Image (cartoon, rainbow, N blue to C red):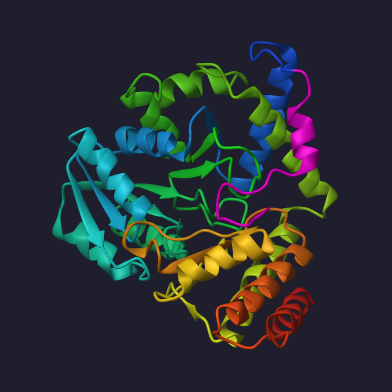
Amino acid sequence: MLLFTPGPTPVLESIRNAMSEPTLHHRTPEFEAIFARVRENLKKLLNLPEVLMLASSGSGAMEACVRTFTTNKVLVVNSGKFGQRFAKIAQAYDIPCTQIEHSWDTPVSVEEVLEAFRADSALDCLCMQVCESAGGLRHPIEQIAKELKALKPDVMIVADAITAMGVEPIDTTHIDALIGGSQKAFMLPPGLSIIALSQKAINMANERDVGFYFNLKTELKNQVKNTTAWTAPTTIIQGLDKYFELVEELGGIDRIYAQTRARALASNEAMRALGLKLYPKTPALAMSTIYDEANASNLRKILKNDFALNAAGGQDHLKTSIIRFNHMGLIPVYESAWVLNALELALQKAGLRTFDGTANAVFLHKYYELLQ
């Protein structure tokens, strides 16, 4: 079965082999050396002065950031399941919260965020996604962060980049906490979350000293010494070390970014050429999401049963209306070509379109054009 869901992504054989090495104790010089390499590679990748790794899914990192960086009241951008999650975390801890809510295909605008902060002086933290993976939507986080900091320099900006980290360059100049997860572009099993921190966020985490297991002050104290407060997910961190080694072998992260962008844009163009509707108004590079309320469920079944291709459906009201195809990670171009070929064949089996090879012709032409 070819796994093409937008998380978890497949684990490459070379990464699986790295994780199958004898387990290292997390309080040894051998593991600390690996931890140090991974920390430095993450800091370089994300262009922020400190990075923490937690033994949790991304939701643990989200919880830590909401609790640590909201002093008075948080504004949450809710354009999907994971924007909702930020709000639910705030509500679980009785943290005052207001939301900007949109349909799951619609990004928030810069002006909406600025107006919310102008209207409510209690707001001191913004939590939002870079890519809202519930619908494959990209928010203009970099522009929002820049203009919000100009309006209110002391605001804390928390960005969930779980499905954007390692997919595209993210300008973190005005972001205080950038959240990532192991099971997306890093092509690792779930279980490791990442928080990259600005200097302002480092200072605030040390001052606030919030929580127990997800206490960022405690983790900062330990991780600057290349160890962790609690038991580290050692095998996943060994796999992440291998991931960075593979990136260098493949020509560096900028080359990976270029290939991912070409793969995503070329896939979108091929899907449009098949007469399919892309769901989000501003598609993220992490995935392609098509909307077909009448046929999405059947197409997914055909893809799985006839072509051994596992694509993702939606959640909640979109459960049977969308199909999401992954672009995150070190994906060979021939796999993406096969996915589009299978999709076109599935359309024929469903009686929606006659197969004529359009998808691959459009995809390959656009992909190599973009990489020139």
Q: Is residue 4 or residue 63 the one in the foreground?
A: 4
Residue 170 is situated, as x and y percent measured from the top left of the image, at 55, 56
Residue 215, can we see it? yes
Out of 126 and 204, give the one closest to the viewer.
126
In magenta stretch: residue 6: yes
Q: Nearer the viewer, residue 112 or 304?
A: 304
Q: What residue range appears in magenta?
A: 1-22
In this picture, is 258 found above or below 248? below
In x, y percent, where is residue 63? 35, 35
Residue 31: image quadrant is top right
Q: Residue furthest right?
A: 249
* Residue at the (36%, 18%) spot, across then down: 212
Residue at 62% across, 69% down: 264
Figure quadrant of residue 349: bottom right
Above or below, 363 against 273 in this view is: above
Q: Position of residue 128 (x, y in %)?
A: 36, 53
Horizontal side, residue 307 vs residue 246: left or right: left
Q: Compared to 167, does 265 lie above or below? A: below
Look at 34% across and 25% down and name the residue there. Answer: 207
Q: Nearer the viewer, residue 58 or 178?
A: 58
> Is residue 125 something one can see in this rendering?
no
* Quadrant location, the C terminus: bottom right
Q: Position of residue 153 (x, y in %)?
A: 33, 51
